């Protein structure tokens, strides 16, 4: 069984950026955001159920999920949101487990924005938190997504606090320093953790 390193952090903290540095070292990734898209991909049974429930307007012309439309439908309606979550969450969970189970590498990086909120910490052997100041999150997430600061702040408020997240951390990567200037330092930190995880995974598998 692959050793599982859960990678988490708040919106805009730099999870994807750091996950990519692990990928460069050959580490396999299971990414909750990717799995969440896979379960509703074109032609999937879940997408058919969503279309049946909300009507065909939830599909694009080419038969893919129209995410903006779905967001509108569930945004102000708690019942619809619950219906959707009950449909998607077990499927996402099952698919993440399946992807983790087939890994043969010594360890796998399990990238989950809501690792703590959704109680997926129990699946992890080790938890790595990407930590930045709230100001950094606001600035980076808003410039990336062209969202306004209030929208980013609302998402931050719905996630666990920085303090709470850090309580769960076995390892921490601070990502406030700016790229690309800080890239050599970040790569070095990732390399050190990589070597540590390889060692830990060996201990688990003897
Ligand atoms: P989310 O959970 O919101 O998807 P994330 O935690 O995966 O975000 P990234 O997408 O990696 O975060 O980073 C957010 C934005 O900040 C991206 O545009 C990324 O290029 C940029 N970024 C990440 N780290 C740094 C850094 N150290 N310096 C400058 N920009 C950075």
Image: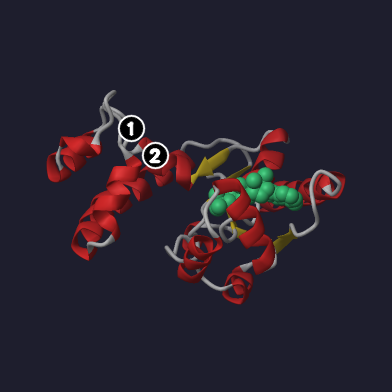
Residue 185 x/y as whole percent: 86, 50
> How far is disc 1 from disc 2 in space, using C-alphas?
6 Å
**Within 8 Å: ligand 1 and the Cβ of disc 1?**
no
Residue 204 x/y as whole percent: 62, 53
Residue at 23 percent across and 39 percent down: it is 58
Q: Residues within 10 Å of mark 1 (few under 14, many from 20)?
A: some
Residue 171 x/y as whole percent: 70, 62
Residue beneath label 1, please? 41
Residue at 17 percent across and 35 percent down: it is 56
Taking the view exactly as shown, the residue that stands out farthest to the top is: 62
| Horizontal side, residue 195 vs residue 151: left or right | right
**Element type where label 1 sits in the image:** loop
Report if residue 3 is visible in the image.
Answer: no
Q: Looking at the image, which is closer to me, 65 or 100?
A: 65
Specify how the rendered protein is coloured. secondary structure
Residue at 28 percent across and 30 percent down: it is 60
Q: Looking at the image, which is closer to me, 30 or 1?
A: 30
| Horizontal side, residue 79 vs residue 27: left or right | left
Residue beneath label 2, please? 37
Above or below 126: residue 102: above
Q: Looking at the image, which is closer to me, 144 or 18?
A: 144
Residue 118 x/y as whole percent: 42, 63
Q: Mark 1 and mark 2 in contact? Answer it, CB < 8 Å.
A: yes
Q: Residues within 10 Å of mark 2 (few under 14, many from 20)?
A: few
Q: Looking at the image, which is closer to me, 95 or 4?
A: 95
Residue at 62 percent across and 61 percent down: it is 138
Above or below 102: residue 143: below
């Amino acid at each position: 069984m692959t050793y599982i390193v859960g990678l988490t952090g708040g919106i805009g903290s730099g999870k994807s950026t750091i996950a990519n540095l692990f990928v460069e070292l050959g580490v396999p990734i299971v990414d909750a955001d990717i799995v969440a898209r896979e379960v509703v991909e074109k032609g999937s049974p879940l997408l058919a159920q969503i279309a049946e429930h909300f009507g065909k307007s939830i599909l694009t012309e080419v038969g893919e999920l129209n995410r903006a439309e779905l967001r509108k439908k569930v945004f102000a309606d708690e019942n619809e949101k619950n219906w959707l979550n009950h449909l998607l969450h077990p499927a996402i969970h099952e698919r993440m487990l399946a992807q983790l189970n087939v890994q043969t590498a010594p360890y796998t990086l399990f990238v989950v924005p809501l690792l703590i909120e959704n109680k997926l910490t129990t699946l992890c052997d080790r938890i790595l938190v990407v930590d930045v100041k709230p100001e950094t999150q606001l600035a980076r997430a808003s410039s990336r997504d062209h969202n306004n600061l209030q929208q980013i702040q609302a998402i931050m408020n719905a996630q666990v606090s920085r303090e709470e997240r850090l309580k769960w951390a076995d390892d921490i990567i601070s990502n406030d320093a700016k790229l690309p200037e800080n890239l050599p330092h970040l790569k070095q930190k990732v390399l050190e953790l990589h070597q540590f995880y390889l060692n830990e995974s060996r201990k688990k598998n003897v």
